[in-house]
Amino acid sequence: MPYPVYMEQSIRNVEDTRKRRLKEELPRIPVGERMPVLQEFHPDFIETSMRELLVGPNKGDRTPNELADLLEGNSHIDPGKIDLTRIDYDVDVLIVGAGGAGAAAALIAQENGANVLLVTKLRLGDANTVGYQGGTQAADRLDDSPALHYLDTMGGARFTADPKLVEALVKDAPDVIRWLEALGVNWDKKPDGSMAEVALAGEAIPRCHCARDYTGLEVMRVLRDEVRCRNINYVEFAPAIELIMDDKGQVAGAVLVNLETNELSLVRAKAVVMATGGIGRLHIQGFPTTNHYGATADGLVLAYRVGCPLVDTDTMQYHPTCAAYPLAILGLLVTEKVRGLGAQVLDIDGEQFAHPLEPRDVLASCIIRECKEHGKGITTPTGELGVWLDSPRIDMIHGEGTVAQNLPAMVRQFGRFDIDITKEPMLVYPGLHYQNGGIKFSPDGATAVPGLFAAGEVEGGVHGKNRLGGNSSLDLFVFGRRVGKSAAQHAKEVRLGKLTLDHVRQWQRELKKAGLTQVRPISPKLLPDYARQPHDYLADYVTERLHAGQIKVA
Amino acid sequence: MAEPQDSTQVKTEKEAKMLDIYVMGKHYQVPEGLTIMTALEYCGYRLIRGCGCRAAFCGACGTVYNFKNDPVLRYALACQKLIEQDMYLTQIPFFPAAKPGYGLEKMEPTGEQILKIYPEIITCFGCNNCTKSCPQELEVMEFMSAAIRGDLEQVTAKSFDCLMCGLCAARCPQGLVPYNVALLCRRLHGRYLTPHSRHVDERIAEIEAGKFDVEIEELQKMSLEELKRRFDERPILKE
């Protein structure tokens, strides 16, 4: 599926301007001048896309409609029908979610003496972690410093990030790189042993550590293997559908469901780590997403229902460059590393309209403006809009073979559809990528509710209202490791009381009080609804039975 | 904006050319342009297993297929392969594979070590089914030969883009698990055989000694206006 004939003229424009553009660099937009383009074109600023929450700890705060529906949803379970004396797993630390943060937390919690249970909705390691391409930031070059990393991160976040969390992030970063290497991660290096680091958007200096453009795959397969080697107990296809508390107001376990048989099982745990990841599969505002099949905000829902406040959930990250063509890979992440290596972003005439390394919120807004206001985008046969990302410029700067060596995933994924990105540009448009905010937590991973900890994409505050590239994977390992330690320590000290699901009953009373009288959506959502046939009678029957006894708020 | 991975939003039957496919032997018609994965969803399957990142990184959806009048098996990732007329499809939700435990810190990066953990790899007789089945088009048999020789550098280079989808193990007549063998080789290579990064050690020592604490504290204490000014004025290194 090579580019359609009608795009040839525009591709020629890109080729014609390439030599001139080799030396052309547009200025970056100063901090004080970013807001107009953001307010007019960033999806977060579309008023009707969000609404105020009517219940829970963030009552009155605005959040995307798709998330609000689930946060205000009802439970999968009827608390009256669950016998909390029949415990299936009794552990020190329960970790919900087995991506980068969950796996890191499991390894460290076990090292700190905890009996760990790791549960996950899909397979061990099926998470957004596996798809991160660009890399992991750490200020370890001699001419870099954690203070500069701090400044970049705060500026990228429009100065809305939590200073203490950012401090933890940047100070732990180099040790994260070394820890992963000791576990067997192969970082890209120069022959003298120095890390081959790439500058991503909003960074003052090359700071991003990569493993080709399969960085997340490399890290996740190593962590997954280590979890297995250390005999950490894990259960796959078993998402948590509700937290269990005790009569002292502490989180004390979770109810799991076997996704294939619908059988419930109960976990009692002295500490619970929420590491369920992101939200992309809710398709906020109908955007295509780079996210994993299971990214449905489950952890936010579960934490919210036990009274845990969320922060910055009024912002989503739209990655500026996701595939706009061909249709089969619409929304596929095109790593920032492509721009970090030198690809510029171009309009239909082959001209630049923004600095390619603007922070993601700014560049995404500039691309939307270029297409929707200036009319300089390229329209695909199915009506999608896009701009060019000039990947062939990379080999012109760094020498032939650079793209093939550094971006094999991109070469392969476009190559499958007969587009050679070493010679032809890529057509891209912003896509839903990351949940900037999440569960409010502190640098040791603790949340407002005793016994509940959080790490990874599900938590918020580290990135404020806009995250820099390479900082999310860093977040996974920094806070995954910290939370592993804190949760293990908490498990040693805590005394659990009598288990209860009263918070679910309380939640249902609050829904009623708020006037949410119709039958609520059931949440967490667990998986997106992509199967086409709504007239699947057998599935309806099974679903009804699963939800049988569910209290409908009258 | 359409979400292509959501089969409900593709062109309707009236607009699109419909193709005949067979899911586990059963006939369906689906519009052209779907992948194997979205075609299954179009047919009404709610995927639980065999579906992960939907972007060719996680290896959850390795699959085999052939055609109504052509029995030769082909291999693909269901999230990437476009539907063709008369395809016979299935899902491979799980395939058992050997995965011994080991502790990297007690090991040496040698061929003897690999053979100790995976002694069966010497039974490879070179049928090359593993290579033929790789949806990433890796030279699987070559990196298995390198593993037998103890050339971890070669195994790492040649297996680096492995998604661990498991198709090679599913097709190996000897029951070998190339993706796990390669993983062990790469881990030993990453830990022991890459040149040492002294600058990382030095930075960690500096951080532990508190070298950057004052500067970070200063940034945390300054006014927002001052912080913004510092940000805008920071030098941006160009390489």
Image (cartoon, helix red, strand yellow):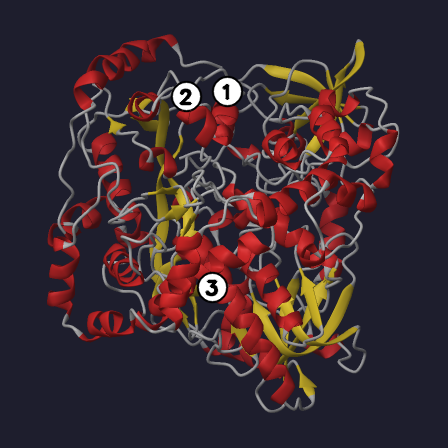
Distance between mark 3 and mark 1 Cα atoms: 35 Å
Residue A336 in sight from this viewpoint: yes
Residue in the foreground of this view, choosing between A351 and A241? A351
Tell me the kind of residue under disc 1. Answer: Gly
User: Taking A500 as reference, is A32 above or below it?
Assistant: above
Q: Position of B5 compared to B107: left or right?
A: left
Q: Do residues under tags 3 and 1 come within 8 Å of each other at their CB atoms?
A: no
Q: Do residues under tags 2 and 1 come within 8 Å of each other at their CB atoms?
A: yes
Q: In which chain is the residue bearing label 3? A: A
Q: Find disc 1 in the rendering and name its residue.
A: A415
Within 10 Å of disc 1 (Cα), the crowding (few <14, some 14-19, many 20+) is some
User: Taking B166 as reference, is A361 above or below it?
Assistant: below
The x, y position of residue A343, in whole percent, is 30, 29
The x, y position of residue A420, in whole percent, is 44, 17
Question: What residue sits 46% from the left and 62% below the top?
Answer: A175
Q: Secondary structure at mark 3?
A: helix
Q: Find disc 3 in the rendering and name its residue.
A: A478
User: Going from the N terminus, do you reach mark 2 or mark 3 first?
Assistant: 2
Question: What residue sits 65% from the left and 91% below the top?
Answer: A495
